[in-house]
């Protein structure tokens, strides 16, 4: 697969995700959730966080961490788009989970 794409990201649910490129493999640790209610929409939520991070100019590893974090909000609610959060809440949780500051 890596012969056809520059970067490959594999999400693994509660096991986190992996980023592969021609030079390396990066493991993204999972974010602990309070309670898994419905995994529907988690992939879309992950992508939205990933894309937001990339649009912000973040390295792919940090963007994937944001994706992982956003996905947790989706699985903690029933339905595909019933979750919500503020930028302040997201930034606080990002700092708690990854011990990194950010400008979300």
Image (cartoon, rainbow, N blue to C red):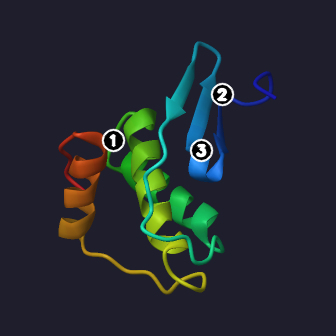
CA separation, marks 3 and 1?
A: 26 Å
Identified at 45% across, 62% down, the residue is: 33
Q: Is residue 3 above or below residue 37?
A: above
Q: Residue furthest front?
A: 35
Q: Left or right of 59: which side holds 103?
A: left
Residue 68: image location, x then y, percent:
47, 52
List x then y, in percent, for residue 35.
49, 71
The N terminus lies in quadrant: top right
Q: Which of label 3 and label 2 is nearer to you?
A: 3
Q: Which mark is residue 57?
A: 1
Residue with the mark numbered 2: 6
Residue 104 sits above or below residue 100 on the image: below
Mark 3 lies on residue? 15
Q: Secondary structure at mark 3?
A: helix
The answer to which quarter of the image holds residue 59 is: top left
Query: Is 87 drawn above or below residue 58 in the view shown?
Result: below
């Amino acid at each position: 697969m890596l012969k056809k794409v520059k970067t490959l990201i594999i999400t693994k649910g509660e096991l986190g995700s992996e980023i592969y490129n021609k030079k390396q493999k990066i493991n993204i640790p999972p974010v602990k959730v309070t309670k898994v209610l419905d995994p529907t929409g988690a992939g879309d939520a992950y992508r939205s966080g990933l894309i937001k991070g990339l649009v912000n100019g973040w390295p792919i590893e940090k963007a994937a961490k944001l994706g992982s974090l956003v996905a947790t909000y989706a699985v903690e609610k029933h339905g595909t788009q019933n979750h919500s959060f503020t930028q302040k809440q997201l930034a606080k949780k990002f700092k708690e989970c990854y011990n990194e500051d950010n400008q979300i």
